[in-house]
Image: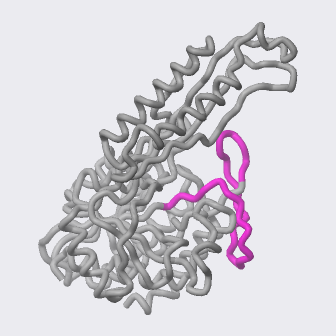
Amino acid sequence: MAAELEPKVVAWRRDIHEHPELSNREFRTGELVADHLESLGIEVTRNVAHTGVVGVLRGGRPGPVVALRADMDALPVPERNDLPFRSRATGEYNGETVPVMHACGHDTHVAILMGVAEALAGMQDELAGTVKFLFQPAEEGAPAGEDGGAELMVAEGALGDPAVDVVFGLHISAQLDVGKVSTRPGPLMASAQDYRIVIRGTQAHGANPWLGVDPIVTASQVVTGLQTIVARNLNITEIPAIVTVGKFSGGVRSNIIPEEVEMVGTIRTFGEEQKETVHRRIREIAEHVAASAGASAEVTIPLTTDYPVTVNDDDLTERGVEVLKQVAGDDGVVESDLVTGAEDFSYFAREVPGFFFFLGGKPLDVPVAESAAHHTPDFFVHEDALELGVRSMLALTLDALGG
C-alpha cells in the first residue's frame, strides 16, 4: 500500500517544499492537509493552535485511540539546493522580510502523514479503534509575542475527545542513511530553554574608559564563565548538557563605550536536577561577574522557549522497535545516541505514552561528514525515505490498534 501511495506522497512533499511557511503562518499547508483529510471522510477540525489541523478517523470496531503527529512549519533560511521544486518563498520574521525554506524536513513529515491517513482511511471498517492525526504548527517556536506549537495544541484539547492513549511521531534525519530508523527508550532529545542576559554598565568615551563601566568587557567575561558550567559543574560522564551563547550585541560605534550589552543563548539538558543546576549557575555567574566589574546583570530564563525532554515510554519503545524491525529489517533499526536537539513532541509525550523515532534521509553515496546539517541552506533529504516513513507509521498504528 505504501508503494502505491509513494507517487502521491512525493508530489505532496514537493508541493509543500516549494511553498514553505513560517511558524503560526502555515495557512496554505493547513488548508492542503484539511482538504485532503476531508476528502477521505475524516472528521476535521481546522485552526487548532492557530493554523493546526486535527483529524479523527473512527474505526469500524471499538478500541484504543492512537495519535500520529506531523509538524508543518519551515524556517527563515534561504535555499541553495538546485531542485526543480526549490523554495523561492519569503515571509516575515522579527519584522523583516526573509527567505523561507523547509530546512528541517517538516515537509516530509506532513506528506508522510497525509499518506498514512489515506492508507488508514481505506481500511476504516477494519480498524479496531480510532486514529487522531495531529498536524502541528510552530514546532520551531512561535513568533515573538505569540503562543503556539504542541503546548498550545494540548491546551486546546487536541489529545481529548476522544482521549488519546498513545502518540507516535517521527523526524527525518540528514545524518542517518536512507533505509534506516533510529530511536532509544527513555530520554531521547534534550529539553531546551532560551535565555537572555543584559549587562548594564556606564557609558563613556572610548578614549576615557576609566570614566565608565564597560559592559562589553564584562559581558565577554560572562561568556567565558558560562563555558565552565558544563566543564566544571556537571558530571558529563553521566549525561550531556549544552550552554551556548548565540547572540552578543552592543554598541554603536568605535569610540563609545555603550551602556549595555545583550546576550541570547540556548540551554540543553536531559534531567530536571541538571537543568536547575545550569539555570542557577547562569544567574550566579552573570550577576557576580557583573557586580565585580561595577556593572549589573539582568537574567531571563526562559525567554521564549521552554521545551521539556522528549521521553520515549519504555514499554511502547520496546514494542515499537520490534514493529520497526519488521518494516525496516533487523539491520535497519539502530539505537540513537542522546540528541541535544529539542522537539516539542515532548508536550504530547508528557501527557500520554509517546514513541518518537528518526527516519533516515541521507543518500547512501554521501558521507555523513558531507551531508548538510539541519537548519542550513544546503539541507537535503532523499525522497526514497518517504515510503519507509509511511510504512513505519502505518505499522506502528496498526500494531497499537491490535493488528
Q: How many marks?
A: 0
The location of residue 134, given as percent across then percent down, is 37, 61
- Position of residue 117 relative to residue 139, above or below, is below
Q: Is residue 209 left or right of residue 231?
A: right
State whether residue 68 appears in this view. Answer: no
Q: Quadrant of the N terminus?
A: bottom left
Front position in the image: 138 or 216: 216
Residue 346 pos. (x, y %): 35, 53
Magenta-colored segment: predominant secondary structure: loop
Q: x%, y% of residue 11?
A: 56, 81
Q: Quadrant of residue 57?
A: bottom left
Query: Which picture quadrant has residue 378?
Result: bottom right
Placement of 286 over or under 87, stated as above or below: above
**In this rendering, is residue 142 above or below 250?**
below
The structure residue drawn at horizontal position 60% and vertical position 56%, both measured from the top left corner, is: 75
Q: Residue at x 24, y 80 (%)?
A: 322
- Looking at the rendering, the stretch of residues picked out in magenta corresponds to 72-98
- Which part of the image, by quadrant, shows the C terminus? bottom left
Residue at x 71%, y 65% (from the top left corner): 79
Side of 139 relative to 127 (left or right): right
Residue 108 visible in the snapshot: yes
* Residue 382, x across and y down, in percent: 57, 80
Q: Is residue 93 magenta?
A: yes
Given residues 350 and 287, the one toward you in this image is: 287
In this rendered view, identify the residue nearer to me: 199 or 305.
Answer: 199
Q: Is residue 80 magenta?
A: yes
Name the residue nearer the viewer: 384 or 325: 325
Q: Residue at x 69, y 72 (%)?
A: 86
Residue closest to the far top: 211
Q: How is the image coloured?
A: one colour
